[in-house]
Amino acid sequence: MEYLGTTQTASYCGPKKSCLLPEPVPTSMTQDSYQTYYLPGYRYLSSWRPSLFYKVSSFRPNSDGQGGGHLCAPLRPPTILPSVRSALYARYSPRDWHHANMVQFKGSDSCRHWAGRLTADSARLMQDKDQLTRDTQENIKKNLGQRLSDVDFWRSELTYELERLLTETHALDTAKRRLECAADEIQGPLQVALESLYSREKRMGIDLVHDDVEKNLIKEVDLLKSCQDKMRKLAERIDQQLNMNRDAQHALERDLGDKNSAHFIDEKCYNLRNTSDSISFYHGVEKIDGTISVPETWAKFSDDNIRYSQNARAYSIKLREEAEHTLESTSEDMWRQFTDTNLAFSKRISETADIKNKLQAHLAKTLQEIFQTENTIMLLERAIMAKECPLKVAQTRLEARTRRPNVELCRDIPQFKLVNEVFTIDDTLQTLKLRLREAQDTLQLLVLNKARLEHDLSVKANSLFIDKEKCMGMRKTFPSTPRLVGYT
């Protein structure tokens, strides 16, 4: 049997639970009791009537006729036609009808109450969520603005530091070129000093002396080589520092480029609106975390780059000051040594010229003495030749008187005088000959002295030519101070 007004496939035959509506209160404590709220096709009962719902058969035999049996299942209430309806079998009472209406009204009020509350809560929820979304979006925009300010700050710091680093690098590179130019410029004076030393090795005799000129030349060569080595070593250090500056510059430029890219992206994000055309859905992007830094490490990275650049600049400034001091000190030292060497040359040339003049004076006197000695020798020879005739006369007289006869060989005064005359003339001849030999020996000594003087004069002339013409001729010019400090 079926309920009146219902179908077996109707979806509303049973109760449906809702998360928005409260569960209905059952009319009885029995689990199988019907719901109190109204559902189409169901009839509401005010009391439990087993005779209307169950037809009990205490025992029904089985189909095989054996003695077994079973309890019959509950049956639907039978259909009661109006014509045969009696008071005993009335379906509902007015009380049930009013109760059902009241229940229906209460259920409707409850549904409308919950619907009203849901509508109000939903409106309030949507308003709160809209306000939260706007506040969140404004907060994000504010944070992006603050982030742009931070990026602008570090961009300005990086740009300022990069400009200073580029300026310092250019100045340091200029100092390096000055050092290289100065080191190359020293090569000329160094060659002059070495040529002067090699030329002075061609001095002869006693003039090949280790004098003040040679000492100053050796000192000048050592000083020039020392200055050259110092400049080149300093240039190498500057070259290494230039590499460090380029590393710092590369780090700053790379960081600045990243900052520019980040600023462009953040500025684009900052200017996005809900009405922008470039917005779209990117599902799952919030789950991707590709960040590699936090604000502290982000700021520390740029700060470290700036500090590295500042340290590089500080060391560059120190190297530039050292290079400037080196150029100035070496220039002063080289000029001082060049002047000292030239003064030693001038003094040596003056001494050599004075000695040469004295030697020429001695040579002139020696030539005069040689001339006089030659005249003396000639006069002595004439005097000796002049004494031969008187000696011949005296000896002839004595020889003639030896032929006197007998007693006439008297040792008279003439004989005595003639003998004395012969001895006197002979002694005179011996004296004159001795003086002649002495004069000849003196003449030889004078000739030897003349040769020595002439040799010394040639040595002094050679020394003067080397010092005055060759060495001082090469040392007439010296690089100017701007050239020595590498400006040209």
Image (cartoon, grey):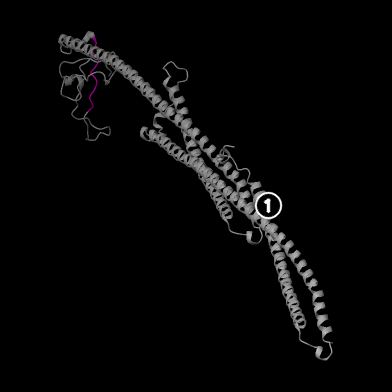
**Start and end of the magenta stretch?**
72-81
Q: Nearer the viewer, residue 114 or 134?
A: 134
Q: Quadrant of residue 457?
A: bottom right
- Residue 42 image point, x, y percent: 24, 15
Q: Position of residue 211 (x, y in %)?
A: 58, 56
> Quick one: 58 or 251, which is closer to the camera?
251
Taking the spot 68% from the left edge, 52% from the top edge, the residue there is 465
Principal secondary structure, stretch drawn in magenta: loop
Looking at the image, residue 349 lies above or below residue 429:
above
Q: Quadrant of the C terminus?
A: top right
Q: Amino acid at mark 1?
A: Phe
Residue displayed at 52% across by 43% down: 332
Q: Is residue 223 above or below residue 206?
A: above
Q: Is residue 179 above or below residue 125?
A: below
Residue 127 visible to an observer of this rendering: yes
Quadrant of the rendered image containing residue 283: top left
Figure check: 254 above or below 1:
below
On the rendered structure, is 327 left or right of 451? left
193 with respect to 247 (left or right): right
Residue denoted by label 1: 465
Residue that extends furthest to the bottom in the rendered view of this protein: 406
Is residue 471 left or right of 160 when viewed as pictured? right
Is residue 76 covered in magenta?
yes
Q: Residue at x 67, y 56 (%)?
A: 361
For disc 1, the neighbor class at 10 Å (few under 14, some 14 to 19, many from 20) is some
Quadrant where the N terminus is found in the figure: top left
Left or right of 284 on screen, residue 421:
right
| Label 1 residue SS | helix
Residue 400: image location, x then y, percent = 84, 83
